[in-house]
Image: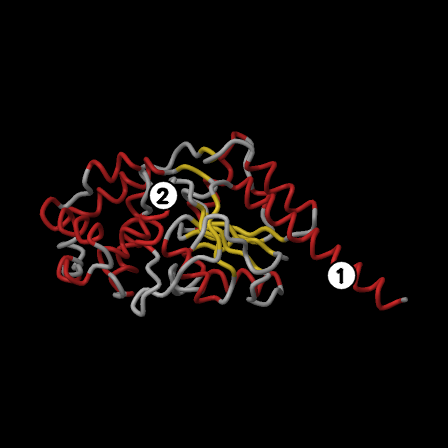
C-alpha cells in the first residue's frame, strides 16, 4: 500500500472524522479515558477485557497488559497523542460490542468534565472544507462523540465556530452502533440522499475509521497526521483474513485531501466533456 496510491474515483461527498482528523481534543480525551480505566471493575467491564494473546498486534497486547497491571494508559501513549479512545476500546474489548458501548457511555460521563478548548489540527482547515463545497462536493462530519458534546465543540473551534461547514453531522448518540460499525456513515449518506459507493470518501485517522468505511462500502482515506511510517501502516493494516481492512489511500494532510478531490473531480469532468464532444461529431 503506497502513500501515493490514489482513490479509485472522484468524490461527490466527503465525510470526515472529528477528533485527531479535523481538530485536537487529545487532552480532554485522555483525561476522560484515565478517569474510567480505574473503574472498569465497578463498571462490570474488567472481566470483559481481551486476553493479550487475542490482540491484533504485539503493541496492542502491550497496551492491554499495561492497563491490566496499572489501570491507566502508559504515559508514553498519552505523550505520543496518536491513539483515539475508540481505538483504545477496540484494543481493550475487541469484538465485544456491549462492552464497548458501556465503555463509551462511561467515557461520555467523564468527558463532560474536561471538554474546553478545541483547536484545528492543521492551519487553514476551514478554508480547505470551503474549497470542497465550492466545487459542489457535499461535506459531512462523523464522530463517536455524543451530540451535545460535539455541538458544543463545533461552536468553540477556531474561535468562530464551524457549524456552517457541514451538510450533515452524525454523532455516536444518533445511532445504535458506533464506529467501527458503518451505521453513522450510512445514516449520513441516507440523509444526503447519496448511495454508499466509492464516490463517497470517508477520511479518518484510526483503524476503526478504515473498518467503518469498508463496512459501509465507501472509499477509505486514512489521514496520517500522526506521521506513521510505511512499516507501521503495514502492521496496523495487515490485510489478513482476520484483519482484512486496508485504506484505499493514505494522505498526510487535509489540504492533500482537498487537492486530490478537486483534481479527480476536474479530471472526470474533462473526460465527460471529451466523450460528449466525440459522440456529437
Tell me the SS state at disc 2: loop
> Circle 1: is it few (<14), some (14-19), or many (20+) Cα within 10 Å?
few
Whole-percent x, y for residue 179 in the image: 39, 59
The residue drawn where x is 55% and y is 42% is 256
Which colour scheme appears in the figure?
secondary structure
Tell me the SS state at disc 1: helix
Classify residue 139 as left or right of residue 37: right
The residue drawn where x is 29% and y is 68% is 242
Whole-percent x, y for residue 217 in the image: 50, 67
Task: Using the image, determine if residue 50 lies above or below residue 73.
Answer: below
Q: From the image, which quarter does the C terminus lie in?
A: bottom right
Q: Which mark is residue 233?
A: none
Q: Nearer the viewer, residue 33 or 279?
A: 279
Residue denoted by label 2: 228
Q: Nearer the viewer, residue 25 or 253?
A: 253
Distance CA(mark 1)–CA(mark 2): 37 Å
Task: Using the image, determine if residue 86 lies above or below residue 157.
Answer: below
Whole-percent x, y for residue 178 in the image: 38, 60
Q: Nearer the viewer, residue 63 or 178?
A: 63
Determine the image quadrant of residue 195. Answer: bottom right
Classify residue 149 as left or right of residue 264: left
Residue denoted by label 1: 272
Whole-percent x, y for residue 277 in the image: 85, 62
Amino acid at each position: 500500500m503506497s502513500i501515493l496510491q490514489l482513490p479509485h474515483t472522484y468524490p461527490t461527498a466527503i465525510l470526515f472524522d472529528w477528533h485527531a482528523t479535523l481538530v485536537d481534543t487529545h487532552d480532554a480525551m485522555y483525561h476522560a479515558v484515565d478517569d474510567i480505566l480505574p473503574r472498569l471493575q465497578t463498571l462490570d467491564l474488567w472481566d470483559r477485557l481481551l486476553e493479550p494473546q487475542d490482540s491484533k498486534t504485539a503493541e496492542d497486547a502491550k497496551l492491554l497488559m499495561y492497563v491490566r497491571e496499572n489501570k491507566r494508559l502508559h504515559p508514553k501513549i498519552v505523550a505520543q497523542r496518536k491513539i483515539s479512545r475508540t481505538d483504545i476500546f477496540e484494543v481493550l474489548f475487541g469484538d465485544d460490542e456491549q462492552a464497548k458501548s458501556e465503555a463509551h457511555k462511561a467515557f461520555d460521563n467523564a468527558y463532560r468534565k474536561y471538554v474546553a478548548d478545541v483547536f484545528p489540527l492543521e492551519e487553514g482547515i476551514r478554508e480547505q472544507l470551503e474549497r470542497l463545497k465550492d466545487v459542489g462536493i457535499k461535506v459531512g462530519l462523523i464522530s463517536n462523540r455524543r451530540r451535545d458534546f460535539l455541538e458544543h465543540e463545533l461552536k468553540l473551534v477556531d474561535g468562530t465556530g464551524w457549524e456552517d461547514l457541514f451538510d450533515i453531522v452524525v454523532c455516536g448518540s444518533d445511532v445504535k452502533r458506533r464506529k467501527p460499525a458503518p451505521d453513522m456513515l450510512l445514516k449520513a449518506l441516507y440523509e444526503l440522499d447519496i448511495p454508499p459507493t466509492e464516490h463517497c470518501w470517508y477520511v479518518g485517522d484510526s483503524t476503526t475509521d478504515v473498518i467503518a468505511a469498508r463496512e459501509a462500502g465507501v472509499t477509505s482515506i486514512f489521514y496520517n497526521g500522526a506521521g506513521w511510517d510505511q512499516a507501521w501502516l503495514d502492521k496496523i493494516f495487515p490485510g489478513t483474513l482476520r484483519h482484512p481492512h486496508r485504506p484505499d489511500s493514505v494522505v498526510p494532510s487535509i489540504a492533500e485531501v482537498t487537492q486530490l478531490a478537486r483534481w479527480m473531480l476536474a479530471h472526470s469532468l474533462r473526460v465527460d466533456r471529451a466523450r460528449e464532444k466525440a459522440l456529437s461529431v
